[in-house]
Image: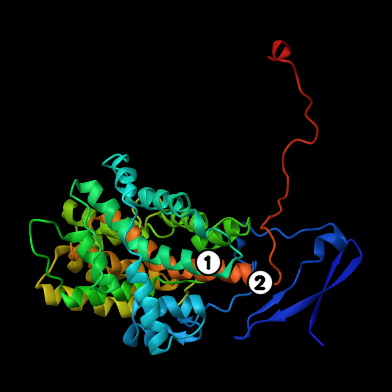
């Protein structure tokens, strides 16, 4: 028999089942709480509320553990590729050789966008943020491809999934090219997923594009590390919007908008802006740290600390090595990297940050890599969104397969006026 929790309110007792996950996580199932007592729970930010049961990603923030479908992120970073990780997240297991070839081939063959998308991007202002462009473009896929929008038709879902993964890199590249006034570059079917993305971003019709394999590997790695991260803000947004039975494209469009925020995916852009600020002011990393520690300052040490990880971010250790590999291979020793390394060394030894467990997170070095390969800061979050896409898709699919599926509808504690009668305009003062 399952363990039960007893809640006593106003002398009334209610027995609530205690459920347990495969990693020992425990939760009190409160689904009958309101119907039997008239009471709800209050949990701003949902930090203590489980919205679903999920078999996709496991995080232990205290121990610094991240696993996709049970596989440690360290193993996937060393041995896998982004498309293989996408398959793992979406279909629940690593593909066989033939399954992977079929999946990768389908993605490659769907990377081209409808030609009218050129006019779509052309209508946007040149200074439009790439995340605004990507969110709008992904939402527009439901208008361009209305033949695969049913969230309960397996064949239509598969078509939408492949189209979205394939076309996301093209849309992100188009958003960037539009912002700098260069012609859109068509995808090349003989390239890998990441190579295709990078050539659409950085090539032009006037010069031969040569891709550095170290850069390709580093970007592939970044996409893997960003592929999913449990029930974060943008993933929860995709699930909540998806619970209305809207199509995949629209649900993911909402997730992109959520990811854009500086408290979420926009943090890697803020890291670079912070490093540039330190460089441009001509101050030392120590001086900036001391300023950031003061309560009356607007300076913040970006890229440190995490809502979930209370020890270290396992992704940071992986990406730090990749960062140094890229810069060494490119022969680049940037001032930004020097500042980043010094900031990390100071923060890891400073009692202020150690006591608060403010360790470097994945955003800290990912921005340095993107900057080193020539990616403008406003594209960092669009690159993040490209990586997070398989996770959003897997979470959306899992939502629709859940036997407890229902439209999301959080409750509230009302704090407004009780009865406030209407007063005609001519009688108001």
Q: Is residue 274 above or below residue 355?
A: above
- On the rendered structure, is 79 left or right of 7? left
Give residue 8's quadrant in the image.
bottom right
Pick the front one: 424 or 125:
125
The answer to whether one can see residue 378 in this image is yes
Give residue 256's quadrant in the image.
bottom left
Circle 2 packing at 10 Å, graded few (<14), some (14-19), many (20+), is few
Which disc, if any, is residue 402?
Answer: 2
Discs 1, 2 touching: Cβ within 8 Å: no
Name the quadrant of the C terminus. top right
Number of callouts in the render?
Answer: 2
Residue 389 % position (x, y): 43, 66
Residue 173 % position (x, y): 27, 57
Residue 295 % position (x, y): 41, 53
Q: Secondary structure at mark 1?
A: helix
Q: Residue at point 47% right, 66% down? A: 159
Give residue 352's quadrant in the image.
bottom left
Pick the front one: 69 or 357:
69
Query: Who comes first in sequence, dot 1 or dot 2?
Result: 1
- On the rendered structure, is 307 left or right of 187? right
Residue 41 % position (x, y): 73, 60
Q: Residue at point 34% right, 44% down? A: 120
- On the rendered structure, is 122 left or right of 215? right
Name the quadrant of the N terminus. bottom right
- On the rendered structure, is 112 left or right of 339? right
Q: Secondary structure at mark 2?
A: loop
Which disc, if any, is residue 157?
Answer: 1
The residue mark sitting in front, 1 or 2, is 1
Q: Residue furthest top?
A: 426
Q: CA distance from mark 1 to mark 2?
A: 16 Å
Q: Residue at point 44% right, 70% down? A: 390
Circle 1 packing at 10 Å, graded few (<14), some (14-19), many (20+), is some
């Amino acid at each position: 028999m399952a363990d039960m929790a007893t809640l006593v309110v106003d002398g009334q007792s209610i027995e609530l089942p205690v459920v347990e996950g495969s990693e020992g996580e425990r939760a009190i199932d409160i689904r009958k709480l309101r119907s039997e007592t008239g009471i709800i729970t209050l949990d701003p930010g949902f930090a203590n509320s489980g919205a679903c049961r999920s078999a996709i990603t496991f995080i232990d923030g205290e121990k610094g553990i991240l696993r996709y479908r049970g596989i440690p992120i360290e193993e996937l970073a060393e041995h896998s590729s982004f498309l293989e990780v996408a398959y793992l997240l979406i279909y629940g297991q690593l593909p066989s050789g033939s399954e992977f070839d079929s999946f990768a081939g389908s993605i490659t063959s769907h990377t081209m966008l409808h030609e009218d998308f050129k006019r779509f991007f052309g209508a946007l202002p040149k200074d439009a943020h790439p995340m605004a462009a990507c969110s709008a473009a992904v939402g527009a896929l439901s208008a361009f491809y209305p033949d695969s929008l049913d969230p309960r038709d397996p064949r239509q879902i598969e078509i939408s999934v492949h189209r979205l993964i394939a076309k996301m890199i093209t849309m992100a590249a188009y958003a960037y090219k539009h912002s700098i006034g260069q012609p859109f570059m068509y995808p090349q079917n003989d390239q890998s997923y990441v190579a295709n993305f990078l050539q659409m971003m950085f090539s032009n019709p006037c010069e031969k594009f040569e891709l550095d394999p170290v850069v390709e590997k580093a970007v592939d790695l970044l996409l893997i590390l960003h592929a999913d991260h449990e029930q974060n803000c943008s993933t929860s947004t995709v699930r909540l919007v998806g619970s209305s039975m809207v199509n995949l494209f629209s649900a993911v469009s909402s997730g992109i908008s959520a990811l854009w925020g500086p408290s979420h995916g926009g943090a890697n852009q803020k890291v670079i802006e912070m490093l540039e600020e330190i460089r441009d002011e001509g101050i030392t990393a120590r001086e900036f740290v001391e300023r950031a520690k003061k309560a009356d300052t607007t300076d913040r040490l970006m890229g440190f600390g995490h809502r979930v990880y209370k020890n270290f971010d396992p992704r940071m250790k992986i990406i730090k090595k990749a960062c140094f590999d890229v810069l060494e291979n490119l022969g680049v020793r940037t001032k930004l990297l020097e500042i980043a390394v010094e900031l990390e060394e100071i923060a890891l030894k400073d009692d202020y940050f150690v006591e608060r467990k403010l360790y470097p997170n994945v955003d800290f070095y990912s921005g340095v890599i993107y900057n080193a390969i020539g990616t403008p800061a406003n594209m960092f979050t669009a690159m993040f969104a490209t990586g997070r896409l398989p996770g959003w898709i897997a979470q959306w699919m899992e939502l629709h397969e859940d036997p407890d599926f229902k439209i999301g509808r959080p409750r509230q504690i009302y704090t407004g006026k009780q009865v406030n009668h209407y007063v005609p305009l001519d009688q108001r003062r």
